[in-house]
Image (cartoon, grey):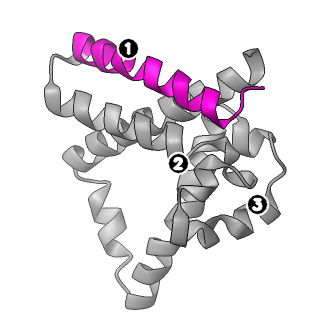
Amino acid sequence: MPNGSTHDIITAVATPVVAWTTYHFTHDWKTTSIIVGLFLFSSLMFNGDLDIESRPYNRWWLFKFIWMPYQGIFHHRSIFTHGLVIGTVVRILYLGIIPFTILLIKGSTGVVAHAFTNPMTLHMAILIFIGLELGAALHTIADYTL
């Protein structure tokens, strides 16, 4: 299992590969920027190690308190934190509770439903998920192979 420094080195090496591959398939700098930016965010701050005291957890600095309940709910390296696809989905849903609760209190939940009926928003949601999943997958694969 790689330590935090090794994960950061793996991220640094993989970033140009993700950028080149994304641009090669899309021929679009905007899409490439979104995916690479979210890949970096996910690799460094939004991966499976948020379930323990770790570099990603500490990088949230003043906002790391957000992840304290998550650490109490999930065990380290469970399918819900380190599972391919499911780990990312769980973290998105977990973090999404905050803005959704605010919208619910304000009575604005229709905004969410409307957003996902817009094809442009759906396209952006897919790009966001791909970027986040690539970073998390790199972390998980490194944990189980190195």
Name the foreground residue: 129 vs 135.
Answer: 135
Q: Quadrant of residue 140?
A: top right
Residue at image point 49% right, 28% down: 134
Q: Amino acid at mark 1?
A: Val
* Relative image position of residue 93 (x, y in whole percent): 56, 58
First in sequence: mark 3 or mark 2?
2
Secondary structure state at the residue bearing disc 1: helix
Q: CA distance from mark 3 to mark 1?
A: 32 Å
Name the foreground residue: 118 vs 12.
Answer: 12
Q: Which residue is mark 2?
A: 45
Secondary structure state at the residue bearing disc 3: helix
Q: Is residue 8 magenta?
A: yes
Is 34 displayed left or right of 88 in the figure?
Answer: left
Is 72 displayed left or right of 138 in the figure?
Answer: right
- Chief secondary structure of the magenta portion: helix
Stretch of the chain drawn in magenta: 1-25
Q: Dot 2, how many residues are within 10 Å of its Cα: few (below 14), some (14-19), or many (20+)?
A: many
Residue at image point 60% right, 42% down: 47
First in sequence: mark 3 or mark 1?
1
Q: Which residue is mark 3?
A: 71
Q: Is residue 112 magenta?
A: no
Q: Which residue is mark 1?
A: 17
